[in-house]
Amino acid sequence: METDIKKNETHLMSDVFVETVDTDKNTENINQKNKEYFTCDVCGQNFGQKQLLEEHFHSHTKEKPYKCDVCEKDFFRKSNLYEHLRTHTKEKPFSCDVCGKEFSQRGNLVRHYRIHTGEKPFSCSVCNKTFSSKSNLNEHFTSHTNEKPFSCDICGKKYSLKVNLNMHFRTHTKEKPFTCAVCNKNFSRKSHLERHFRTHTGEKPFSCDVCHKAFSLKSVLNVHYRTHTKAKPYFCEICHKDFSHKSALNVHLRIHKNEKPFSCHVCNKKFSDKSHLNKHFQVHTNEKPYSCDECHKKFSQKGDLKVHYRVHTKERPFSCDVCHKDFSRRCYLNAHFRIHTKEKPYSCDVCNKKFCHKSPLNKHFRSHTNEKPYSCGICHKAFAQKCGLKVHYQRHTNEKPYPCDICHKDFSRKSYLNIHLRIHTNEKPYSCDICHKNFSRKDYLTVHLRIHTNEKPYSCNVCGKVFSLLSHLNLHNRTHTKEKPYSCDVCGKGFSQRGNLATHYLVHTGEKPFTCDVCHKDFSRKSHFKVHYRIHTNEKPFSCDVCHKIFSRRTHLNLHLRSHTNEKPYSCDVCYKNFSQKSHLNVHLRTHSNEKPFSCDICFKKYSQNVDLKRHYRTHTTNEPHSSDFCSIKFSHEIDLNDHY
């Protein structure tokens, strides 16, 4: 009996259990069937709640009934308003379990979590590139369609994303809603604030796979990669120059447009690049916040300090592909490369002279304007170039910080030392394209080329005489001013040229350092030795254009030319008689002064000319070198022979 009751209870419990399960399923199915949906009359979308339908309907009517009490911004949905309010309250109720980062919206947390999981569920149907968020996919997709549906009401600029339009709009409203908690600096974009914040934290989350250099911005890392790949994706359509940065191209284009949008509010000088303006402004402030740890030299820019460090480390990371010469700065390499390409992109607006670099053009332009912006604080002498002022200043300080390791001679400039070293190495890197003569200095080559071009760019304001060298003009000017700034310490004689004084000193020392290999005659001047050597070679390199007579000396040619021009530039101050040669004037002046500087060693008779003394000597020697061709009578003087004829 009890067994039967238990069986019946078990059966009853099973039935109840089965019935209970079935009842839940049926109820769920019934609710699913009887569930009421609210459908939008405009787009047909269904909603489970009437309130959701009403909020959705606002997207069609453009009605925004929910307003923020703080900034009065309007929203379609109440939930959007609540999310927005957290930007004012700084409330971030959603946090990441992995890194602990907090978010004001759950959706942002979900998207952020994919950084840790590496999940990219959204794929582009065109190029199959995957993305972690749908918004990033939508943004990417516009690169294929080139669609820009959002335009600015003020300037008409178009954007592919509304968020970009909103950010752009702040350039007109000057709105900067994001503030740095450390320094209170304001930003128009949140990304700019995050980027700025790394200047306080020193965080550099982006690292180069090649050299492991770390960067605070991904965009800067991408640009840095191009130093390894040598990629230059941007090029100028005018001159076809390539650039690794788009910003560098934009700045470069201003050279062609002559556009200088940045102006100094102190001196009103204009610049094409903002960085150049910032650099220039430190001329007024004299601010130098960066100091070298090695020598404590100060710099106004961090980049200049980094380049300066290479002086101590001897680092030269930029190498020429043609001659493999190394440089400490890229700009030096670029400037050097134009030696190989013969490129001269900068030209003078006045004389059309072309230059490899902009700085020589600026210096050259001052030759037209006669501008000398740099002045010495001690003697107030003005200079057209800053380097000229620096070299001049060392005359006051007598500073010569660059010594030669071979002969220990000191120099005030490193460039002078480098040029001097070529004396020891016999290096002559500059070659003439016409005659292939080599030179140790570029300025020597430039001067030499004027022999071929017959260029004489410097002219005397007094007599109009032209010169190939400015130094020659300066020396010539002293013939008009009678200036003789160099005087002999022994006899007090004055000279217009330092070289003439040095040569004159040899008169007192008796030194004759130049010896002829043929006849062993000694000379005090190298120029005299060269002229003398032509006696042995019978070389006469100077020719008259009129009668084609040839001469061994240029001075002899110049004197000869006056026989054609009848030029007599030397005048006697006493009787105003004119002479073609200065020596003739000097001899003539003795007729007024009765000076007779030439004396016979035998009878002590005096003469005003050396030729008269030589003629007189023959009366003592009975030497009669001049004989008649007709009667064989001999004479001691040629003038007597001529009278006999």
Image (tube, rainbow, N blue to C red):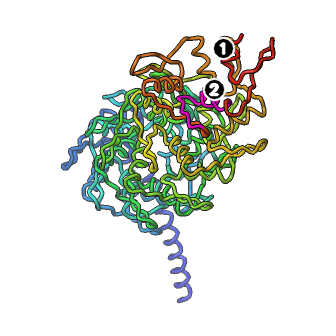
What is the three-letter code of the residue carrying label 1?
Asp
Classify residue 144 by image quadrant: top right
Label 1 – label 2 distance at C-alpha: 13 Å
Q: Residue at the location (63% across, 26% down)?
A: 554
Who is closer to the viewer here, 285 or 553? 553
Q: Callout 2, which amino acid?
A: Arg
Magenta segment: 603-618
- Mark 1 vs 2, N-terminal side: 1
Quarter of the view holding residue 63:
top left
Could you say whether the residue bearing mark 2 is in a helix, strand or loop? Answer: helix
User: Where 76 falls versus 449 (above or below)?
Assistant: below
**Marks 1 and 2: CB-CB under 8 Å?**
no
* Residue 564 image position (x, y, % from top left): 60, 11
SS for dot 1: loop
Q: Position of residue 232 (x, y in %)?
A: 60, 40
The quadrant of the rendering that contains the C terminus is: top right
